[in-house]
Image (tube, grey):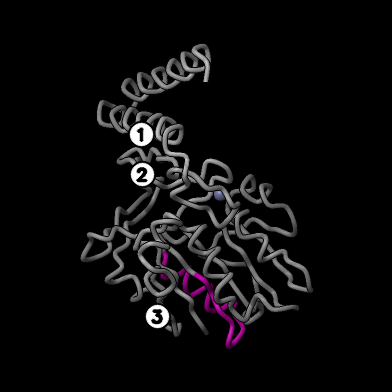
Amino acid sequence: MNIRFLTAHLTRDLREIVHRARHNGAASAWTCARTHAANALLLAMAKFHRAPRVWCPCCGWAGYAFRAVDAEACVLYNSECPQCVSHERHRMTHLFLTARPPAFLKDGKRVLHFAPERHLRGFLDGPGALRCVSADLAPEKLRLVGGPAFRTDIQCLPLPDATWDGLVCIHVLEHVDDDRRAVDELRRILKPGGQALIMVPFGMHLERTAEYGRGHEIMFGHVRDYSPRDFSERLGGFHFEEIRPSALFTREEQRRYGIPDSEIIYLCTK
Ligand SMILES: [Zn+2]
């Protein structure tokens, strides 16, 4: 790393911090500064500590730690793979689908992938006759993965009843006004015996889910902050299995893959 590169990097970071201070306030600028400092420290540590400590199952990258992510309200440490940009949920799902592939990953099944993540397409676009279609409210998100896709609102799906074998819906429900209606729609379009893989971000400290009433300005536009203690109440009508990281990994494996306890998969069966 030469001095010119370092200076350019620092100048860019400082500009961003100042911009955040002016437009979003001191707390936001402080989060931004801590994120940049954490990632600079990671680069330095990687120089001195060459033995990998973490490993990304999505792309095979190994290193000292995953990058810190600026979440505006807080810093998410050890979160983002510097190579494939996978986050905790992608690594958790990748390992789960590898270890315990659901029935809908079998040949000939019809799978609808909401807010499609490219990290999972290796499973959903795999060989065989698996038919995967993507759906999102934002067309630009659909262009990231290609393949058959359509724009839709998950709360009001323009699809007939009982027509899909599998649904993948990861970090979507926290963005919609009426998540119970969205879950009803998921159940409606699934065939009997079909399965939906659902994940939401959890506030592990919350006793009850906190409703904001509208998209929170500094929480990625989330309409609510889910508690793992009451989330399953919203899955009414589904039989579901709650798969926690501790059911799949040892503590050492969780640390190696950068998967915290909050990454919980709900495998819901109609
Ligand atoms: Zn990766």
Q: Is mark 1 within 8 Å of ligand 1?
A: no
Q: Earlier in the sequence, mark 1 or mark 3?
A: 1
Q: Is residue 131 above or below residue 91?
A: below
Q: Is residue 166 left or right of residue 214?
A: right
Q: Earlier in the sequence, mark 1 or mark 2?
A: 1
Residue marked by disc 1 = 38
Percent position (x, y) of residue 88?
45, 55
Residue type for callout 1: Ala
Circle number at residue 77: 2
Q: Earlier in the sequence, mark 2 or mark 3?
A: 2
**Label 1: few (<14), some or many (≥20) within 10 Å?**
some
Residue lying at 31% horizontally and 33% vertically, measured from the top left: 31
Residue type for callout 2: Tyr
Residue lying at 58% horizontally and 55% vertically, measured from the top left: 58
Residue 53 at least partly seen: yes
Q: Nearer the viewer, residue 243 or 254?
A: 254
Residue marked by disc 3 = 236
Percent position (x, y) of residue 40?
40, 29
Q: Is mark 3 within 8 Å of ligand 1?
A: no
Q: Is mark 2 within 8 Å of ligand 1?
A: no
Q: Which residues are magenta?
A: 179-197
Q: Is residue 71 above or below residue 169?
A: above
Q: Are marks 1 and 2 in contact (CB under 8 Å)?
A: yes
Provide the secondary structure element on which disc 1 rests: helix
